[in-house]
Amino acid sequence: MTPKRFLSTLCLTVLTLVVMAQPKAKYVFYFIGDGMGVNQVNAAETFLAACEGRIGMKPLCFTQFPYLGLVSTYSASSGVTDSAAAGTALASGVKTKNAAVGVLPDLTTPVNSVAWHAQQHGAAVGIATSVSVNHATPAVFYAHVPERHAYHEIGRQLPLSGFDFFAGSDILKPQPKEGGKDLYQQAADKGYKIVRGYDEFLQQANRQKKLILLQPLRDSKQNDYAIPYKLDRKPENLSLEQITQAGIRFLSERQKERNGFFLMIEGGMIDMACHSNDGAGFIHELIDMDSCVQIAYEFYKKKPDSTLIVVTADHETGGLSLGRGKYALHLEKLLHQKMSFFAYPRHLAALRREKGSAFSWDVVRQDLKENFGFWEGLELTEAQTERLHKAYEQLVDDSSENKKSLYNSVDPVSYTASQIMDEHSLIGWQSNGHSNGFVGVYAIGVGAEQFAGQIDNTEIPLKIMRAAGWE
């Protein structure tokens, strides 16, 4: 062997040994805050500081991670993406057209997700969300369809993935159009145990190989699309924290006979609240997701040499601005809001049914005072009061039409109340849809240094796979 060839061989051997010696991420947490642009994160931290009576910011758990990047989100068909295309980029590292799930822009060729690669390398896999398990973002990790609203087909593909753990509000469109087994039975036939609520999970988890955790049936009858908002949640409701704890517990047991785990957790209702331009709603959802990141961070502190946590978003929703022209911001006033603008129209409708002909302006005024602090904690102008009174008159007029966003229908009183909350807090919204605003990526653990700087959303799953050795 010539000296030159010997030196080349030696360098290659040393490089190979160095690569082999680098630690790998055995445990991977992948958090996706749906609709969580950088201004949404800013708002949550500003709100937390305002709650302490000061101007400034109180850091969330994930914003204190050592590596931070800015992420572009455009899709193959538009500068403004939807969740399906953005999710496909975050899951599989490819751009596709809006509405497409797990396929190339030809809408036919399937692409494999980071979850699939984790499974192929022997890791246990979990897909969890605060919305339905066959909604766009969770779907991109296991399904391949040209249209995100093909809920039944997506749900049919869920158990075919063979992933170990799923969790969310429910399974949308479970009944087949032409008879046959529903999606619950199809999952059961593939070895999945379906449990409802965290208590039932605790009873069943140790005896199961594959599991789907859903909210209690009574809650799904009210809304199968998502678990209750943090603002509306009762102790008996399934929470995203419980879903996170369940995922870690179940996968930790499964990985003993496998090779680590991959757990994706979506804070899906940040997006829903932003679609409704609900300031308090999205802030509480974002803080709620951060509490789940904190749970993962506690796991990381026990295994820092083998864990990676990545937190990002699929897109920004609402075109949120923090300020409305005045050099001021009063997010502390959102503390007066006791109910989301998803729940309040239903609450108001129930109140109207209860009161019947006694459903007067005084009744509505008192209810607004109790749920939003109007005329008490928040002083309203005469013009604002008049707008609410006019909205009440429109509400009792059966010919009035509700305002609609992507996930919600809002009566005139609820719509006007949300506008007034924005006026007091000085939050501004550009639309009820998505924007092309940057989102952040925040990382800690093995391979986290890859996520610093400005990157595209397609790079994130590739970097995760590189950190874990799942390429």
Image (cartoon, rainbow, N blue to C red):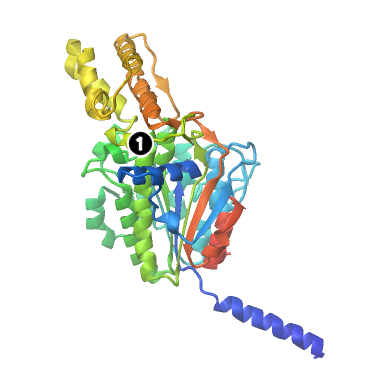
> Does residue 33 appear to the left or right of 20 in the view shown?
left
Q: What amino acid type is highlighted by mark number 1?
A: Ala
Q: Looking at the image, can residue 39 be seen?
A: yes
Compared to residue 274, the image places residue 114 above or below, namely below
Q: Position of residue 225 (x, y in %)?
A: 37, 36
Disc tally is: 1
**Residue drawn at point x = 39 percent, y = 14 percent:** 401
* In-front residue for pair 355/262: 355
Check the picture and name the quadrant holding the N terminus. bottom right
Residue at 33% x, 35% y is 334
Image point (34%, 36%), residue name = 224
Instruction: Evaluate whether residue 37 shows in this view.
Output: no
- Counting from the top left corner in percent of width and height, residue 115 is at 49, 57
Q: Name the residue under label 1.
A: 280
Residue 405 location, quadrant: top left
Q: Position of residue 272 (x, y in %)?
A: 41, 35
Q: Quadrant of the C terminus?
A: bottom right
Q: Is residue 312 above or below residue 172?
A: below
Q: What element carries label 1?
A: helix
Image side of residue 76 versus residue 191, left or right: right
Whole-percent x, y for residue 178 in the image: 43, 32
Return the residue nearer the eye: 14 or 187. 14
